Amino acid sequence: MKLVFEHATLLDCTGRDPQPETRVVVEDGRIQRVGPDAGPGGPRDARVIDCQGRTLMPGLIDAHVHLASLDLDPLAEVAQPPAVLAMRIARNIEATLDAGFTTARDAGGLDWGFKEAVRQGLIRGPRLFISGAFISQTGGHGDHRVRSDRGTFPVVPGLASESILADGAEQVRHAAREVLRRGADQVKVMASGGAASPSDELDHVQFSVAELGAAVEAAGAVGTYVLAHAYGPRAIQNCLKAGVRSIEHGNFLDETTADQMLAAEDVFLVPTIITYELLSAREAGDGWTPDMVRKIRQGLTGAYDSLGLAFEKGLRIGSGSDVLAEMQGEKGKEIACQARVMGAMNAIIAATRTNAELLRIEKQAGTVEPGKRADLILLDADPLAEPAIFANPGHVRLVALGGDVVKDLDANPPP
C-alpha cells in the first residue's frame, strides 16, 4: 500500500523536537521520504491521510508483556477450556495492537503458535518476540507450587504460561535449548524472587553465575540473548557477571550496581512500574494472597527511586508494562509512569527507539526515518504535553503496520 501522511506534527523519536507541517511518504511497507508539506508530494495513486496537525510517531514497543497471563490465580487459568484460553489470548494480542503497540516482546508464557497465527493473518497483532516458557530454579519465582505440593504444576500446553524448573548449569542449558527449540526469540530466566511466587522473597537470589552463564551460552550460540527477572543488587550483579543482556524490573537497584551496569557492554534495564501501581491497589482474593500483596507493595516502594538512579547514571532504559490478567489493557500507562521521572520525551523514546535497540531491530523500527518499516501511529493529542494519553487506546486514531492500515478510527469509528 502507498500512503502519504500530510499536515502531520511529526514526533520521529530520534530526540528531535516535533516537526510541524510534515509529510511522510510510504511505499512497499517502508518510509520512503520525510519532509515538509511544501516539499515533493507522494505517488499519485497513494492514499492520502490528512493528519490535521495531529501527532504522527513510530509505533510503540512494549519490551515486557505477558499476553498469555489471563488470571492472577494460575490454577484458575489452567482450569478453563482450551478454546476459551486461546480466544482470550488472541483478544489480548489484538487489543495490544489497537493500543498503538506495533511490536511487543513477550517476557514469558506465550507459545510460538500465536506468533505464527499473527504471521499467517489468522489474528491481528503486533510483531511478536516471544520467550516461551520461563526458566526457574526449584522454589524460584517460576515455581508456583504451594509448599504442601509434592507434584508438578498443571499446564495446558501452548495455552497456559509454563515454567521449566532447572537446577545446575547443565539443566539450565538444556532448558534454554528447549525453549529455543520451541521457537523462542530470546531466553527468559528468573534470577531473583518475585511477588507472585509462594516460596521466596523479592530479594532472594536465584540461580548461580554458572547457571545463568549456561543460559547465556545457549542463547548466544544461536545469536540471541537472555533477559532476567531481577530485583536486587546481588541478583543483578550475578546477571552481569554471566552476560545477561536485559535486566527486568530492577526495583532495588543501588549505585554500585548501576555503575556496573553502565560499565557493562550492551546491557539494558527494563522497568515495569505500572504493574506495581495497579497490583498495589488490589487487596487479597481470587488467588492473590496476602503475601503477594505485601511483596508487590514492597516492590513499588523502590520502583521510582531505582528508575531515577538509572536515569541519573545514564543507563540504557527500555520500557515494559508487565501487566497481568484483566489489567492487560493498561499497557500504555507505563509511559506516564516513566515520564514522572524521566520526562515525557525520554519516556516515549524508551518505548520506541531504545526498545528497538534492545530487540535489535533499530534498523527497522523505533524512529520515523527513510528506509525503516512504516510502523506508525497517529494520535489525537500531544503526548509530550499529556503522556497519559497512551493509557486510552481511543487516542490512537490510526495504526499502520508495515504500511498497512490496521486501525483507523476516523474512517471506521467504533459502533
Image (cartoon, rainbow, N blue to C red):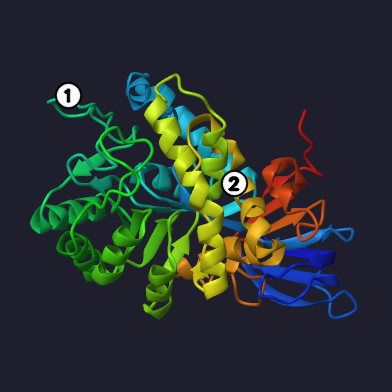
Q: Residue at x 17, y 24 (%)?
A: 149
Please identify the quarter of the rendering in which residue 68 is found. top left
| Numbered badge on residue 149 | 1
- Label 2: which residue? 97
Q: Tell me which amino acid carries mark 2.
A: Leu
- Give above or below for 332 relative to 378: above
Q: Nearer the viewer, residue 119 or 151?
A: 151
Structural distance between the alpha carbons of marks 1 and 2:
39 Å
Quick check: can you spot residue 409? yes
Element marked by disc 2: helix
Q: Position of residue 361 (x, y in %)?
A: 48, 69
Q: Position of residue 4 (x, y in %)?
A: 78, 65
Q: Tell me which amino acid carries mark 1.
A: Asp
Quarter of the figure with the C terminus: top right
Q: Is residue 333 left or right of residue 47?
A: left
Disc 1 vs disc 2: which is toward the camera? 1
- Give above or below for 186 relative to 24: above
- Give above or below for 320 relative to 348: above
Quarter of the figure with the N terminus: bottom right
Q: Residue at x 51, y 41 (%)?
A: 323
